Image (cartoon, grey):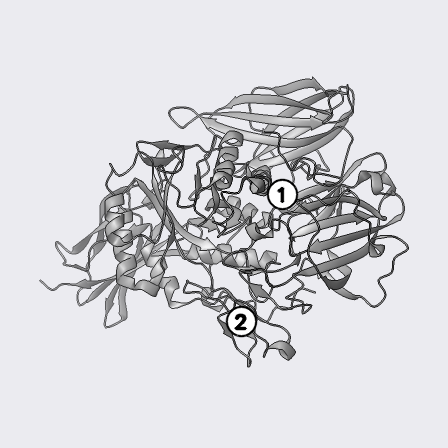
Amino acid sequence: MRLQFTNLRCVSLRETAPLHLLLPFACLCLAASVFAAPVPVPGEAPVPVDRLRPGNTNVIPMTGTWRFRLEHGVSPAVKGQLPADAAVPDFATPEGSDAGWTNILVPANWEIEGFSMMTFQERPATSHDIGLYRRTVEIPAAFAGKTVLWHFDGAYDGAELFVNGQRCGYHESGFTAFNIDVTKALKPGQRNLFAVRLYKDTSSASLDHGDFWVLGGIYRETYLVALPKLHVDDVTVVTDLDEQYKDATLTSTVRVVGPAGAHFVLTCELRNLDGTKVETAVMRQSGEISDQADGSATVTLSAPVTAPKLWSAEKPNLYYVFYRLSDGNQPVERVQDRIGFRKLENKGGVQYLNGVPVKYTGICRMEEFSPYGHAMTEECWKTDVILMKADNINAVRLSHYDHAERFMELCDEVGFYLLDEIPACWIASEVRDGSRTWAYILRTKETIDRDKNRPSVVAWACGNESGYGVNNQAMFDYAKAHDPTRPAFISQQNQGQNPRTDFEDYHYPSVQQLRNMANPNHAKIPVIITEQHSTDVGVAEVTNFWNIIWPADNIVGSFIWEWQAQGMYDKFPERWAIPAHGAAINDPKTGFRNAHGSGPVTAERQITPVFDFMKNLYTPVITAAKEVAPADGKFVVPIQNRYSFTDLSELACRWQALAGGKVLAAGESRIDAKPRSSADASFPATPGMDTLRLEFFHPDGRSVYTVSLKVRPL
């Protein structure tokens, strides 16, 4: 992705056309959410991730126009399971009718599209909407004999799925991706009826409520994917580095499913992004599908990799791992994953990435964008990525739930450190109730299944501000058992509650508390501040806060609350006078509904004064000088390089000699300063100048730091 950093202050989408362990949940209804099976690659080489599904003959998009009707009620599911005798509703049968229904576009939130009032927080639940969706789709004859999964990246909150009048499954979790096997209900070569009954109020919806807009609908990508009967069902990739952080070992653990007794051969190649092969030892393994109920086999492929380019937010180097599956005679399937080589470690109370301490200049982000609600677009995601990079943000807390897969892909490409937060917000009354553990584990499993191979994901964050109990401990334990390569922590629950936590996590500490945390003896593990005030507490306090964080290696970083104002424009003037539940502001003249926000951008991504403040707060290049004096015809300016992996010589320093605002002379310098070091930089002195202006530009074109230094007369 090539970022464009021009006209940042004009960014707005306001005028854009609107969008028309054995687990107790393993037996959800008729069909459980299966593993995150990868989409088959159509050719003999990797495909860019944003082009893998469009035009792929194995994939049928399920986005677009659906027939829709809104009803009201509560999901009958108990602990995520529908009653065994639940009847199939008439609308989901071929004989049913959608006469009198209206159209809705998918993806979309039905509140945003005018079917009901939008709600904020839902504490307690105030809307009991049920969305009924209906659509016919031509299924290719080529899908016959294949396993067909119906994938959703997000459907809020409980989705009951039907094909041709057959109930195929039920899934309950509003922000996590899932697949449902619909093979037995499909009729390849014919038009098939697909129907969804989507409940906003479910037995576990409380985990999906919180300090955000709570909106129903199929609001993210959905598609059908056809897989051969023998296919790759799950891939886990680990990139371990040697003690010098130079060479790596690439290990893939691959689950293959198929008919009992089926023989298979799996090979693996490492590829550059341009598709060329990276030389490694041959990675090849054969196996046989077991005759057990799950009909699977797991194999491990591994090889050393010499001096791969490592991934970091500063240098987001990516590779493809390309897999070929055969039955021993004929090729059956090709799949891919996009990875980055990097290693996270906690040593001596400091977090290291690839052997170097890192600092997270972070923000808390909601997956919301006015006026689209949660149904964000490619333009929305790229707008956020560009603005956050321009604001010197290098880390994003995904508050308080899984973000869209496409946003995650962009973060891998552009370079952000992500705290992947598993949904469970503000539910202190439930975390001690062991009868609800299934809901916490389900969301943890599905989050990790989807995101475990992403280099940008640097930690699993188990919920938000919910105290401590058996349920969030179960989330943490599951995360550590299934992914020992990443840190994990429970929100604000530290070693006194969870001795195995990888971070001491705090929200809104005082400056004095932070000074105590900066003591290297404060804890044996790193400190992280996952919520910090913006300028609502004053510029001086936030500045003092970061003056403590920057030099303290044991404080990994901090995440300002929050990226965008949580507002939403209502597209329907006839209801502007009706208050939206939970909104602090309901403007009857504009339709703007706002909950709160004091961050760097508005709900529509207009830049606020906080933007420039944060850019300077988070700058990776800085000088302590306020003024300079000439000596021997030049100025010497001390420059600190706060980057972890970038030599300052990679940035262009453009200088200007000014007098009364007029440019007398200008030039460009390259300053040699290794990562995490300082250097003295020299600039020519021009007679009559009163100001030396310096501006540092990143190789991608963005300005990262600007300073004007007063010239002190001799």
**Image quarter hosting the C terminus:** bottom left
Q: Is residue 2 visible?
A: yes
Measured along the vertical axis of the image, is residue 183 above or below residue 596? above
> Residue shown at 28%/42% (left/top)?
673
Look at 44% across and 54% down and name the residue there.
364
State which tag comes first along the sequence, 2 or 1. 1
Describe the element under mark 1 as helix, strand or loop: loop
Residue 452 in the image, given as x and y percentages of width and height: 55, 37
Q: Which mark is residue 706?
A: none
Q: Position of residue 35 (x, y in %)?
A: 66, 35
Q: Name above or below for residue 498 compared with residue 296.
A: below
* Disc marking residue 593: 2
Q: What residue type is labelled 1?
A: Pro
Residue at 42% across / 57% down in the picture?
Answer: 390
Callout 1: 10 Å neighbours few (<14), some, many (20+)?
Answer: few
Disc 2 vs disc 1: which is toward the camera? Answer: 2
Classify 10 Å Cα crowding around label 2: few (below 14), some (14-19), many (20 and above): many
Residue found at the far bottom of this picture: 589
- Residue 48's disc is 1
